[in-house]
Amino acid sequence: MTPGLMLSLLLSQTPVPDIHYTAATVEEGEQRTLESYSFTEWEPSEMKEPLYVGVDEANLRQTASAEGAVVATLPLGAAVRVLEKGKERLKVGEYVNHWYSVEYVDAKGTADAADDVVSKGWLFGNTLTPFRFEEDFDGDGEKEVATVVMSGDFKIRVRVLEPNVKPPRRVSSVDVSPSGEGYLSVSGGRAEVKLVPAKKAGVVLLQVDSMPEACADFSTTYVSYTGQGKKKGVLGKAKVALGLVGLSDPPNSSKFKVSFHAGKKQATVVRTTVDDVDEETGKEQTTKEQTRYQLNDGVYSAVKPAGSSVAESKP
């Protein structure tokens, strides 16, 4: 087996990271138990597979307590290594999770390891994420840092940090609703995230996929970050650029395919919908619909109304 083939095989077997945070739906006035929550849990890891701090100015604490002394304050996107997971699941504020003992290395902005400062302490699990992206999202010539976490109110929260703005007003965020809540009778859901480069879409986007591991609705949401006239050192705004929802509930389904046109900053969405099988003919009714969208100020709008549908029958 050639080295290239071995690498390709290893990459194909690498699990796609995701995050999830759910709890069973309860009646009004009913309290959830700690055991009713399901969330992503992390295990001790090597630094070659770090996690990241998904919030800005996170307090690294000396003990596994919200009252513990602060060892260091970590910026959004800081890389940490998990050393230990706390045994108990606890509720801190609006979140249910574990405390994690982590190690953080502050390189002081230099390549010389001699001046690195190593800090060890505890972070609550809701602040950790595998999703960190550093790109020039707003086209101002400076790279911003973006992270994705699950919020305490069961949303997928995208945060973007403007590097040359001082805290606390250097982060813009936008929430995305997870899919599958109604079908699965839960609050919350799961998310996978990947970067869409500017050479593909004409602008840097984050693609947030929420796909339950069951028959249900699913979604893909594109998030943009726009600045103020490409001014450096000015906080921009994270926005939902385009949201698409599909359905997988055989025999019914609704799927979509997105194609970007970078030069025109446009996107074409082809949606294929399959309805119930006709009892008389034994054939399913398939409808295809194509819509083109134009990007303006970080948001896609339909160029023309949807409606150019063509019905197709498949045996």
Image: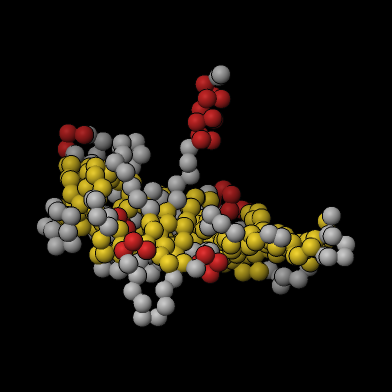
Q: Is residue 53 left or right of residue 224?
A: left
The image position of residue 127, as x and y in percent, is 31, 57
Looking at this rendering, what residue extends furthest in the top direction? 1
- The residue nearer to you, when weighing 125 against 77, is 125
**Residue at x 29% of width, y 49% of height:** 78
Q: Quadrant of the N terminus?
A: top right
Q: Is residue 234 visible?
A: no
Q: Is residue 210 left or right of residue 279?
A: left
- Is residue 85 positioned above or below 14 on the image? below
The image position of residue 57, as x and y in percent, is 24, 59
Q: Is residue 38 left or right of residue 214?
A: left
Q: Is residue 300 visible?
A: yes
Q: Quadrant of the C terminus?
A: bottom right
Looking at this rendering, what residue extends furthest in the right direction? 281
**Residue at x 68% of width, y 68% of height:** 303
On the image, which quarter does residue 220 sit in? bottom right
The image position of residue 75, as x and y in percent, is 27, 54
- The residue nearer to you, when weighing 40 against 104, is 40
On the image, which quarter does residue 160 sit in? bottom left
The color scheme shown is secondary structure
**Residue at x 56% of width, y 57% of height:** 214
The image position of residue 271, as x and y in percent, is 70, 61
- The residue nearer to you, when weighing 55 against 297, is 55
On the image, which quarter does residue 69 sit in? bottom left
- For the image shown, how many numbered marks are present on the structure? 0
Looking at this rendering, what residue extends furthest in the left direction? 69
**Residue at x 34% of width, y 70% of height:** 32
- The residue nearer to you, when weighing 277 against 95, is 277
Q: Is residue 245 left or right of residue 82?
A: right
